[in-house]
Image (cartoon, rainbow, N blue to C red):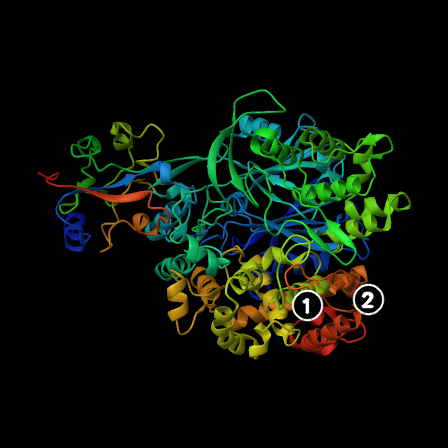
Amino acid sequence: MSLQDKADNNAADLPRHRCFVKVLSERCRGCGLCELVCSICHEGEARPNISRINVKKDRDNYQFKLSVCFQCKKPECVPACPTGAIIVERKTGAKIVDEELCNNCGLCAEACPFNADGHIIFPHPSKTLHVKCDLCFFRAGGPVCVEICPTRALVLKEIKGGMK
Amino acid sequence: MIYGWSGKILSINLSRRKTLHLDTMKHAEDYIGGRGIAAKLAWELVPPAIDAYDPRNPLIIMTGPLTGTLAPTSGRTIFCSVSPRVYPKPWYTHSTMGGLFGSELKYAGFDGIVIGGQSEEPVYLWINNGQVKLLSATDLWGLTVSEVAKKIRARHGLDIQLACIGPAGENLVRFAVISHPPENASGHSGFGAVMGSKKLKAIVIKGSGGVKIAKPAKFVEACRHAIEMSRTGPVDSALKVKLEYPIPATIPACAHSCSVNCRLGRVVYNIPRKFSEGEPIKARQTCCVGNLWIQREAPQGGYEGGGIKVPHVTGWEPEEGGVELHMLCDDLGIDLWSLLTLQPWFVRCIELGLQDFEGLKIRPRDADWFYTLLQSIAYRRGLGDILAEGMRRFIHQIENKLSEELIRLGVALEFGFGFPAHREGRIWDSEPLPFWVVSALMYATESRDPAIGTHSSFLHLAELFLYDRKLFLTKLRPIAAKLWGSEKAIEPSFEDKTQVTIWCQHRHVILDSLPLCDFSFPRLLKPLKDERSWINADYVYGDLEIEANLLSACTGYDISNFKLEKNAERTFNLERMILVQKFNRNRKTDEIVAPHFKLPCKTDGTNISMEKFRELLDHYYKFREWNADTGIPTNDKLRQIGLEICV
């Protein structure tokens, strides 16, 4: 079964709109639970630097900056991929990297206009592929980071008709 | 495959500049991590009757299997060593902190660091993902904590984690902290001075690894449950839940992976500077963490009884320099609590007509005067040089110049082997019976002030008791019967308090071994929404399996709460044996704290005579199976809990 079929079959039980994780950085307390739960759910390891969501923690100034993929309506990463490894999940519009197809070239990471810090799409530190937020398409409940955030700094946002 | 733990502890000798790796797993099953494994290492490494500044004194820095994981509040670090603060002679104790240091250490591949020896030149330790280097700190020596942080970050990048000492640690101030800037510190135990004696200015860590989880789905579920159960913050709780649920404000988490928005600070605002030039200060009003010290005139402030008086101290408003005083303590690396003992003592000096010390005029209500005094302590100048020895040693040195009341006040403020009074129903907090009795027994049988690890297990319940005594007793009696075998354990009396005490001590060891924060765990009571739900609830018992479930899912070991408490008993007894065999701790030492509890309790006026205190101890020793005359664990007991090494 292709990833596209798998994604369509298992897709998060969400409405057919463009979805993305909206970040409200002003609510963030820098606890890092989102990074930890993301890495555990995706990799079985609590490891912030393979988390698909990133918290930049400036504890001196009490400022925390969250970054995660916007799941753009017209994504730059998808056409940039020479192997067609980034597929669009049909229900939520999540842009998912197909591990089988990704050749780790990094063109997607370069193409993404929001990836200056390298936190949106980035090379996996121990595998030969790039990773990015997939809205936890394999979970019926949707993105696990949204569920765990104790201050509701992460919200699952739907744009109606965003898929058209 | 090892889950939870990294599997190795870095051991470094600063004299020989040699490193080696110790196997964590050798101790993991019996001692879990943190304080447990540290005790096992200390048993092997600490020579008898050693001084805190002896090069052979190891500074043991530990994390636990949960550090760096999703487990709420687990991002903590545990420090253990022989403490220079302990009065009259240093002995082995512990101190913990939050922040991100412990997590980073795990991500760099280590469960802990054992630092022995003494460097000739100032050095700092640079741990970069398993690569360990000792680098010269000549250019850092003498710098304040914030200056060190700035230099280190410029050198090694912004995403490192740092623990360091300020001038107070370098100058062996007995209450110097190990700072983890900007706002966490291992405070009371004076381990900053141990680092100073080793000429170790800082430990800098960069880690990009992770902590492997044995059963990810189960672990996430266990964490979600723990987060849900602790969402109401500290159970001091019952009352605050009623008043403040849900908690709206967001403040920075004081430890990695802390889900709890506890009320240790909340307001961020700009404060103009009084003592220095520069941008306004961003600070938050806080109690234990953060960088603003102001103790407003609270109902629990001040104390009078038993021939001593602790004057109200109010601290200073931000615009008076209160924030900068707090920041100065952070920068110099001084335990902030020293302000809480120094200020009332000096205020009382003035009230009793003592206006100056050897020509130095006392102005303790004046922020400027304190600003200078703190510096003179950190740099050991003039009067500061004696004060740097801690209140008890200071009093001892100058007692021929003091009235009896001032001597007694000084002793009362730091009565617990040189550690400050805290949650013992008298000086700072107002725990009535039965709470202060449990606190008293803990003070008598531990190595430092005990309240640091028992807020949620028992002492914070005092707030609910004071709020509604009848509601408290009705709801807590069934829990007391279940957990401590007697409904009387929770009654305002002296009966059956041993069981509560021992349980609290074991829960404290569990928290410091996993580790978790004692402001959130154990969840003795379930989170209830408001006062009505408290009244209507049949049974308010929380969930004490949370810790064991987190540990089991994280490590893959099958560990029940029962086994965890047994482990804690082993660690507690091992710590006792370290004190007994290496530092001559015995029943007589335990009884040193008894006179403090002759002072009447601030809330209900109750107290205890020496004779009655001895009876409490008899009961405690009997329950512990310690020798009644000596206070030393019996050989049978030691064998029974797997401590043949101590027999």
Residue A38, compared with residue B598, is above or below; it is above
**Is the residue marked by circle 1 packed among few (<14), some (14-19), or many (20+) residues within 10 Å?**
many
Question: Residues under labels 1 and 2: Cα distance?
Answer: 18 Å
Residue at figure coordinates x 34%, y 59% from the top left: B217
Query: Mark 1 or mark 2: which comes first in sequence?
Result: 1
Is residue A126 in view from this perspective?
A: no
- Number of numbered markers: 2
Q: Is residue B452 left or right of residue B69?
A: right
| Residue B362 spot, x, y in % from top left | 78, 34
As drawn, the residue found furthest toward the top would be B277
| Residue corresponding to mark 1 | B573
Residue B602, compared with residue A97, is above or below; it is below
Q: Is residue B428 left or right of residue B306?
A: left
Q: Is residue A12 left or right of residue B144?
A: left
Q: Which structural element holds mark 2?
A: helix
Q: What is the chain letter for disc 1?
A: B
Q: Mark 1, mark 2: which one is toward the viewer?
A: 2
> Hey, what amino acid is under mark 1?
Asn
Between B109 and B569, the one lying in front of the other is B569
Q: Which structural element holds mark 1?
A: helix
Q: What is the chain letter for disc 2?
A: B
| Residue B234 spot, x, y in % from top left | 49, 56
Between A138 and B16, the one lying in front of the other is A138
Q: Is residue B532 left or right of residue B339?
A: left
| Residue corresponding to mark 2 | B588
| Residue B245 spot, x, y in % from top left | 39, 54
> Hey, what amino acid is under mark 2?
Lys
Between B128 and B523, the one lying in front of the other is B523
Q: Quarter of the image holding residue B412?
A: bottom right
